[in-house]
C-alpha cells in the first residue's frame, strides 16, 4: 500500500510511504548536502515516536522545515491506516 | 481590537511559517475554502505541529474551521482545541452552530455572518457565549441573495450597518468582508473607508499586500489621537461630568471614545 502527503511547492515536501520488510529512507532535496542528515533524523524520529520500523519512506524535499517534514510523514502514515494517537 | 485579519491557507507551509511578517494584527489560518477535501487531514496535522513548535506574542492567531454542519467540524476542533490560539472563526454561523462549538471549547469565537438568515439573527448570535467579534462574509451573503458585488458596495450597506451596530452594542469587534480584487489598491482603500465610515472596527483580507492599507485605514489618525489626548487630559483636570472644548460639549461617551482611541494608538505604537 502506497500513500502520500504534501506537495512540491516551495517550503513543502512530498512524502510517500509504502510497505517494506525493512526501514528504507530515500531523500531527494535541493539542500541535500546541507540538510540531508537533518531531514533523515526528523523522519527517523517521527517513525520512532510512532513505533514504526519497517517501512519505505520517500521524501521529495523543497526546503521544508522540520515541522513540515514531520507533518507530511504523519499524514501519509495516517492515510495508510496507522494509528498515530 | 485588531485592525486587520488576514486569511492564510491552512495547508501551505510557506505562508504559515511567515505569518508574523505580514504585519496583520490577526491571522486566520483557514481550514475551510482554501483547503481541498483531500487535504483537510494534512492541514490539521501541519497546523498542530507548527503551533506546538512555534509561538507568537505579537499576532492574534485564529483558525477558521469548517462549518458545524460539515463532516470536518468535530475533527477540526478536536485536533486544535489545546493549541495556543486566540480562538475560532466559524463559517455559516448560527446560534445553534455556536452552541455546538461552545460545547467543545471555551475559546473565543468569531462567527461569519454570511447568509440572510444569519443577518436576521445577528443579535442572538452576538449574545452567545465566547463571541468576541462579528465578521461579514459578503461573497456568500450576496450569492444567497442573488445580487452582484460592486465597488460602491450599496448591496451590503444594510449588512455592514447592522453588523457594526450590533457589535458595538454588545462591545464586540466588527470585521468587514475581504476586498477580493487583490490587484486593486485604490478600490481597497475606498472599500475599507466605506466600512470604517459605517462603524466597522476592522477588515479581513485574503492577500498580504492588502494589510498595510487596512492597518492605515483602521488606525486612529494623528489628529484623532491629538484630540483624544486633549479630551482625556481635560477630563482628568475637571470634576464636572461634562465640559466644553473648542466649543463642543464633551461628556462621558465622548471621553470613553477618546480613551479607546488612545488605547488603540498605544497598542499600535502610533
Image (spheres, coloured by chain):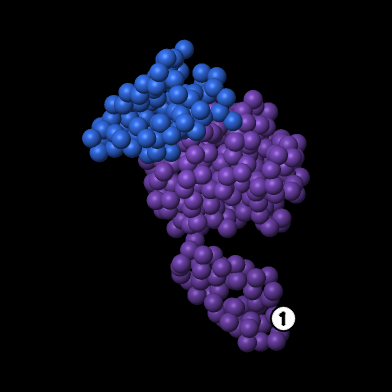
Chain colours: A blue, B purple
The residue positioned farthest toward the top in the image shown: A1
Q: Nearer the viewer, residue B103 or B23?
A: B103
Q: Is residue B200 visible?
A: yes
Q: Nearer the viewer, residue B92 or A44?
A: A44
Front residue (pair B260, A61): A61
Is residue B213 visible in this depiction of the protein? Answer: no
Q: Quadrant of the C terminus of chain B?
A: bottom left
Quadrant where the image shows the N terminus of chain B = bottom right
**Position in image of residue B252 (x %, y %):** 69, 74
What crowding class fits label 1: few (fewer than 14 Cα within 10 Å), some (14-19), or many (20 or more)? few
Height in image: A84 above or below B253? above
Asked if residue B215 is positioned above or below residue B112 in the image, the reply reads below
Residue where numbered disc 1 is placed: B241
Residue B121 is drawn in which quadrant? top right
Please give the count of numbered marks on the rendered protein: 1
Q: Position of residue B35 (x, y in %)?
A: 50, 29
Tell whether B251 sits left or right of A21. right
Residue most extreme to the left:
A33
Amino acid at each position: 500500500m502506497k500513500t502520500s502527503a504534501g506537495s512540491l511547492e516551495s517550503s513543502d515536501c512530498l512524502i510517500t510511504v509504502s510497505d517494506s520488510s525493512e526501514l528504507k529512507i530515500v531523500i531527494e532535496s535541493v539542500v541535500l548536502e546541507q540538510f540531508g542528515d537533518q531531514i533523515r533524523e526528523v523522519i527517523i524520529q517521527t517513525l520512532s515516536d510512532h513505533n514504526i520500523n519497517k517501512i519505505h519512506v520517500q521524501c521529495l524535499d523543497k526546503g521544508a522545515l522540520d515541522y513540515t517534514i514531520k507533518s507530511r510523514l504523519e499524514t501519509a502514515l495516517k492515510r495508510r491506516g496507522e494509528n498515530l494517537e | 481590537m485588531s485592525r486587520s485579519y488576514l486569511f492564510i491557507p491552512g495547508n501551505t507551509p510557506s505562508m504559515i511559517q511567515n505569518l508574523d511578517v505580514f504585519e496583520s494584527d490577526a491571522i486566520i489560518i483557514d481550514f475551510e475554502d482554501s483547503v481541498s477535501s483531500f487535504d483537510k487531514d494534512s492541514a490539521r496535522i501541519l497546523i498542530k505541529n507548527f503551533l506546538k513548535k512555534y509561538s507568537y506574542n505579537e499576532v492574534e492567531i485564529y483558525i477558521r474551521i469548517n462549518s458545524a454542519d460539515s463532516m470536518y467540524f468535530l475533527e477540526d476542533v478536536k485536533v486544535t482545541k489545546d493549541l495556543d490560539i486566540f480562538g475560532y472563526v466559524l463559517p455559516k454561523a448560527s446560534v445553534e452552530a455556536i452552541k455546538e462549538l461552545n460545547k467543545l471549547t471555551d475559546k473565543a469565537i468569531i462567527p461569519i455572518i454570511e447568509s440572510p438568515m444569519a443577518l436576521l439573527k445577528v443579535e442572538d448570535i452576538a449574545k452567545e457565549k465566547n463571541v468576541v467579534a462579528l465578521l461579514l462574509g459578503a461573497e456568500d451573503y450576496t450569492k444567497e441573495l442573488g445580487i452582484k458585488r460592486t465597488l460602491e458596495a450599496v448591496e451590503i450597506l444594510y449588512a455592514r450597518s447592522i453588523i457594526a451596530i450590533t457589535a458595538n452594542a454588545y462591545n464586540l469587534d466588527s470585521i468587514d468582508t475581504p476586498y477580493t480584487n487583490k490587484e486593486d489598491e485604490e478600490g481597497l482603500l475606498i472599500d475599507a473607508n466605506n466600512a470604517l465610515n459605517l462603524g466597522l472596527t476592522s477588515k479581513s483580507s485574503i492577500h498580504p499586500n492588502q494589510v498595510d492599507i487596512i492597518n492605515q485605514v483602521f488606525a486612529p489618525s494623528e489628529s484623532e489621537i491629538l484630540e483624544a489626548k486633549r479630551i482625556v487630559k481635560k477630563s482628568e483636570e475637571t470634576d464636572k461630568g461634562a465640559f466644553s472644548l473648542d466649543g463642543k460639549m464633551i461628556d462621558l461617551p465622548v471621553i470613553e471614545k477618546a480613551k479607546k482611541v488612545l488605547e488603540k494608538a498605544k497598542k499600535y505604537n502610533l
